[in-house]
Image (spheres, helix red, strand yellow):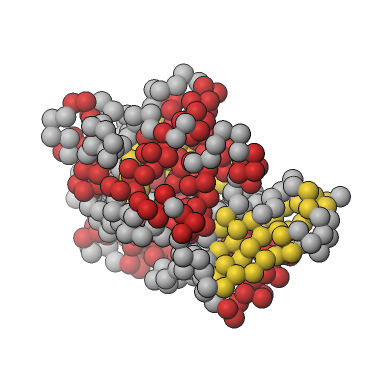
Amino acid sequence: MSPSNSPSTSTAHLTPQYIISKKRENKSPHTPTEISWFIRQFSNGNVKDYQMTAWLMAICINGMTDEEVAALTEAMVQSGEVMEWSCFLNGNNDATNVHKVDKHSTGGVGDKVSLILAPLVASFGLIVPMMAGRGLGHTGGTIDKLESIPGFQTQYSAKEFANLLLSPGATSNEPLGVAIVSPSKNICPADKRMYALRDVTSTVTSLPLQTSSIMSKKIAERPDSLVLDVKFGKGSFNSHVEESLELAKRMIQTGELCGIQTTALVTRMDDPLGCAVGNWLEVKECIDIMTMEDGDTQQCELSKDLIDVTLALSGQMLVQGGKSATLKDGIAMSRENLINGKAWEKFKEMVVAQGGDLKSVESPNEYPQATFSASVIASQSGYVSSIDSMEIGLVSVLLGAGRNTVDEAVDFSSGVMFHKRPGMLVEKGDVLATVYTERQAVLENSVLRVKHAFAFSD
């Protein structure tokens, strides 16, 4: 049963103090009605920030049941705008029957999967309504990457978002089926306020609060199903696989309790994903993958981990969307549409639909390069055993490709392009990577840090 459909009970006896003390004492779980009331009163200003903070700390200490997390998630969804698809379809029953499937990643260095995955899955006739975020700290953001395409728009209301997805694409009368946008301020506003309080009261790491915050924005899209990419390793927010497995389990349970078929893949993020870190550099890598010829061994080798993760997620999304009977078949089908150009054509349709400059993506080598660049040269021979993704993420921020505060601007052309990846043989004097920036003062130090991020074995 979805939390929002649970039997209602009286709220006359409820007060903020009652809700806080109940979670503090932790003798019995909250009911969905209690959680819904508390979040609604917080949204209306009747529950004060200090009262919400006390409740969040009680949750951080005492935890929440799966049912409580699902109820909190749904309450945050209901605090704002929701993608109620039936209101947007205007009687278009064909569109009503099209499966809507989305993916969420917990994020990592060089994680550009969505740029290929969303159009790839949409090329099979599924609808992919993807809301994504901006980068903060050592991890990049999908929205920043897409906005490096000149003219590309990411700010849309729920109705405009639906119109994008359901309107015919540039090359057919079929629905476009894919759009990647930034959540509007009206999506889960309670979560935004709660996260700001968590950020300054050391409750960000609470697993129930992490789960509800992540899942609320995805559930607000009202997809039919959801696939999660939960990262672990040096370049992710969870360094240990056990933490990521627990987070994956909680998010799956929350999705299912909210009525959305949910699965998860737990993937490693010790090395940067793919061969590029930095907004436009990552877009270009994705373009190179979507336009590569079958048998392009160099691109396949440089981007192998990115391609493998993308195909695995796509295969699972095809299974959940009813396009494939097995994950193995879904991966094979996805590989075919990646190689035959269908994903590339759908990507270009998405760029045009969202106002992007088509010439920029069709001729990526003409994109303006950063003013300053330098090569990272190997001082020894051997096999690359690893590249410290956390260090690379921090260097990318120093170069201008990332941000430390939410209102900080990013340089679209800055970043690191790798020419050698883990498992590759390196000779002394080979170019390991190229560093790009608009900040000449940080170039020399950045080159040294990238060089030291490489580890070698005989």
Residue sitting at 56 percent across and 58 percent down?
Answer: 277
Q: Check the picture and name the quadrant holding the N terminus.
A: top left
Please tell me which residue lies in front, 226 or 411: 411
Question: Is 412 on the left or on the right of 128, as rendered?
Answer: right
Residue sitting at 42 percent across and 72 percent down?
Answer: 408
Which residue appears farthest toward the right when viewing the image? 458
Which residue appears farthest toward the top when viewing the image? 325
Give residue 411's position: percent from left, percent from top.
Answer: 46, 68
Give residue 305's position: percent from left, percent from top.
Answer: 61, 42
Question: Is 303 on the left or on the right of 363, as rendered?
Answer: right
Answer whether residue 234 is visible to the viewer in this image: no
Badge count: 0
Please tell me which residue lies in front, 447 or 392: 447
Which residue appears farthest toward the bottom when viewing the image? 441
Question: Is 258 on the left or on the right of 304, as rendered?
Answer: left
Please tell me which residue lies in front, 404 or 434: 434
Give residue 323's position: percent from left, percent from top.
Answer: 40, 23
Residue 288, placed above or below residue 168: below
Residue sitting at 64 percent across and 43 percent down?
Answer: 298
Give residue 324's position: percent from left, percent from top.
Answer: 45, 21
Query: Image quarter for residue 87?
Result: top left
Residue sitting at 25 percent across and 53 percent down?
Answer: 156
Answer whether residue 373 is visible to the viewer in this image: yes
Please tell me which residue lies in front, 187 or 78: 187
Residue 326, placed above or below residue 34: above
